[in-house]
Amino acid sequence: MIEGLLLYHPSWPMMVQFTIQPDSEIPASTQLFNQICFAIASRQFPPGYRLPSTRQLAMQTGLHRNTISKVYERLETAGFVEAQVGSGIYVRALGQESLPISEAETATPVSELIEQSLDGFLQRGYTLKQVEELVLNAITERLRASTSVIITVPKHDWGAGEIMVQELQQSLSITIQLVFLEELAVNLKSSSAATVVTVRYFATQAEEILGAVQADHSDPKAFRIIPIDIYDYSEELELIKALPEGSRLGLVSLSSGTLGVAEVMIYSLRGEEVYVMSAECKDAYKLNAVIRHAQTIISDQASCETLKAAILAAEPDLIRLPKIVCCRNYIDPQSIELLQRELGLDSGV
């Protein structure tokens, strides 16, 4: 039995469907938590989006309101959302990002926006010379912070960091350093400036560390954090939905965290209709087990060549070769474009 919830918001083009397996060994709260986290991390629920009330979610999923309340509390503790008294639960804006721009604001000519900003400064008593100095200083500080770009993730999920470094170095053609969250404070204290980049899953922890460093630094503006969104995996999810009952699906990734979330989400979607097995690509034993038993294997780009080489080596002993699906990205392409602009890079991605 699968209970579903279909949610839609006019600012995003696709619909988000939550599915819960009520009889699963995986707690229903964990299933819902992971699915909402993914919807936020992939920007299907953008900053400022209001989550449905506990009553609405309970009516549509069959979960108890207390269960949903605990999920929302867990989301707030993790820094994904914030409660506004008398209004609801909203997706939290992180770091440098802002809330969605309205259609009217998008349609406003850039020259008009500049004039409005200038008028605002002048009305506050600033002179044009002072405004020029403020703007130039702000741009200089951002460019200074961009001279050192750091990817940060927890040490236990180093694979996610490796994936991000590979994708961003390839797309942006700049040197990027991987620093674990546990070592970030020490690294930043020895730096004069830096831009810290991470995915939303780890952004709250990174914000807390960066805030402490900024408080003790003579030039706090020399450090900034930019959260990036992950790919929505819509094509891969459609493929999983279409798999025949009884299919054996393999998952291969550098990131242990990605594998854990993917397993819960796939189980929430298909239950025991699909048998799922996973392996980190550097775990040769588990990787070979996946190759020998899975009919379809979904892999991230960073693991794809290792997976193909392992299949080639095992081919003489295989009855039939598994179907390989290599995901296009881990990072959402729009986030890469935004990061390019934030870092002041000239060429397109």
Image (tube, grey):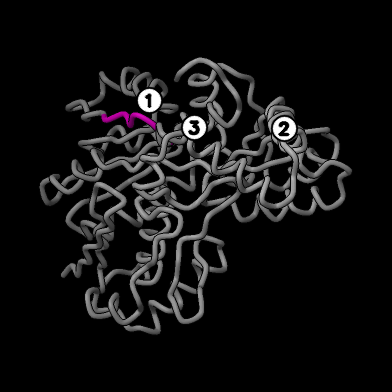
Dot label at residue 304: 1
Residue type at mark 2 is Glu
Tell me the kind of residue under disc 3: Ser
Report the side of 169 relative to 238 (left or right). Answer: right
The N terminus lies in which quarter of the figure? bottom left
Numbered range of the magenta stretch? 325-331
x and y percent of residue 336 in the render? 47, 30
In depth, the one of 271 and 331 nearer the eye is: 331
The tag on residue 132 is 2
State if disc 2 and disc 3 touch (CB < 8 Å): no
Q: Is the Cβ of the residue at disc 3 closer than 8 Å to that at disc 1?
A: no
Estimate the spatial distance between the alpha carbons at disc 3 and disc 2, rounded to whole Å. Answer: 16 Å
Residue 330 in view? no
- The residue closer to the viewer here, 333 or 284, is 333
Identify which residue is drawn at 39% across, 79% down.
Answer: 67
Q: Is residue 104 left or right of residue 86?
A: left
Whether residue 292 sits left or right of residue 348 in the image: it is left
Q: Nearer the viewer, mark 2 or mark 1?
A: 2
